[in-house]
Amino acid sequence: METTNISPENRNRKFLKSINLFLFIILLLMIAGFFTWSENIIITRIIKVAGRTGVMFSSVFIYYRITCYGGAGSLGYKNILPPAFYIGYLTLGAISFAWNSNPGFSALQWLMVLQSFVFAYFFIKSLKTLDIYFEGHQIWLYNLLGNAVFVIYTVFVTGMWADPDTFFRLTNGGEKAQLGGIIMNPNELGMLAGAGIACLIFDLYRKKNKLWIIIKIAVIFYALLMTGSHSSLMED
């Protein structure tokens, strides 16, 4: 019987490719979890609680998958104050439930902050572990974030033509239509676009074939203009 031996290089390449895909998917889902995809409050809460909790645990799973593969979890900390202050902030938020007039809504917001904190911790820890134990890997935060924003904005650009009543929000007494609709505040959506464009610009320096990257940036920039975001476009 013939056996096939896979070289360590090929095995590592396959492993890193799968990690890159998983990191991209959970980052995309985490960002999408901030949006209100339905006016139905039950569906919205399922997405924001169950969906984002699943994504949070997925980030933990991916980190431990990296460590089990060979990237030992031996990272140290150079600055403990930011996470310490964040934990303090979460603690004060939990204490405030005692006198809050709407503890249910506040608990939902607190849970979303906790989910984001845990997700970001393990997501960045995964990237740092890859940097140490897999020299020369091609998994970059700016590439993951830029592509995730591009996918999200492709949905918005498609939606603004297919279902403008959902994807546009009328402002200034109905005189101005801004991309975002019931799904996302146009100003916040515009700031997300700015982050996506900034990340994709790094790909322009890294890749030789720049046409596809330029198309991605153009799609996001077009959507940014349609948001009419005061924060990102400095419009009056």
Image: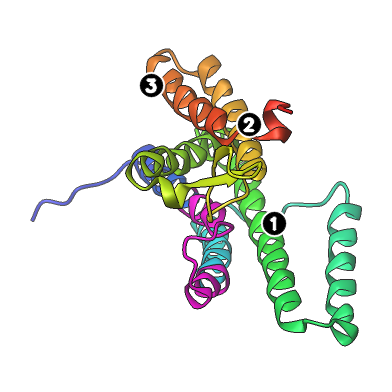
Q: Residues within 10 Å of mark 2 (few under 14, many from 20)?
A: some
Residue 194 is labelled as 2
Q: Give the residue pinned by disc 3.
A: 212
Instruction: Name the chief secondary structure element in magenta.
Output: helix
Cα distance in 3D space between marks 3 and 2: 18 Å
Which scheme is used to colour this image of the protein? rainbow
Residue at 49% of width from left, 42% of height from top?
Answer: 148
Is label 1 in contact with label 3 (beta carbons under 8 Å)?
Answer: no
Picture mark count = 3
Q: What's the distance in space between the residues labelled 1 and 3, CA to CA? A: 31 Å
Amino acid bearing label 3: Trp
Q: Is residue 161 above or below residue 111?
A: above
Residue marked by disc 1? 121
Q: Secondary structure at mark 1?
A: helix
Nearer to us of marks 2 and 1 is: 2
* Placement of the N terminus among the 4 image quadrants: bottom left
* Disc 2 residue type (three-letter): Gly
Residue 164 is left or right of residue 227, and the answer is left
Residue 195 in the image: state x and y as whole percent.
63, 34
Quarter of the C terminus within the rendering: top right
> Which residues make up the magenta segment?
24-49
Coordinates of residue 162 in the picture (x, y in percent)? 32, 44
Q: Nearer the viewer, residue 85 or 187?
A: 187
Q: Quadrant of residue 17?
A: top left
Residue occupying image coordinates x 62% and y 26%: 198
Q: Secondary structure at mark 3?
A: helix
**Mark 3 or mark 2: whose residue is earlier in sequence:** 2
Residue 105 visible in image: yes
Q: Residue at x 73, y 26 (%)?
A: 234
Residue at 73 percent across and 78 percent down: it is: 107
For numbered disc 2, what is the local secondary structure?
helix
Which label belongs to residue 15? none
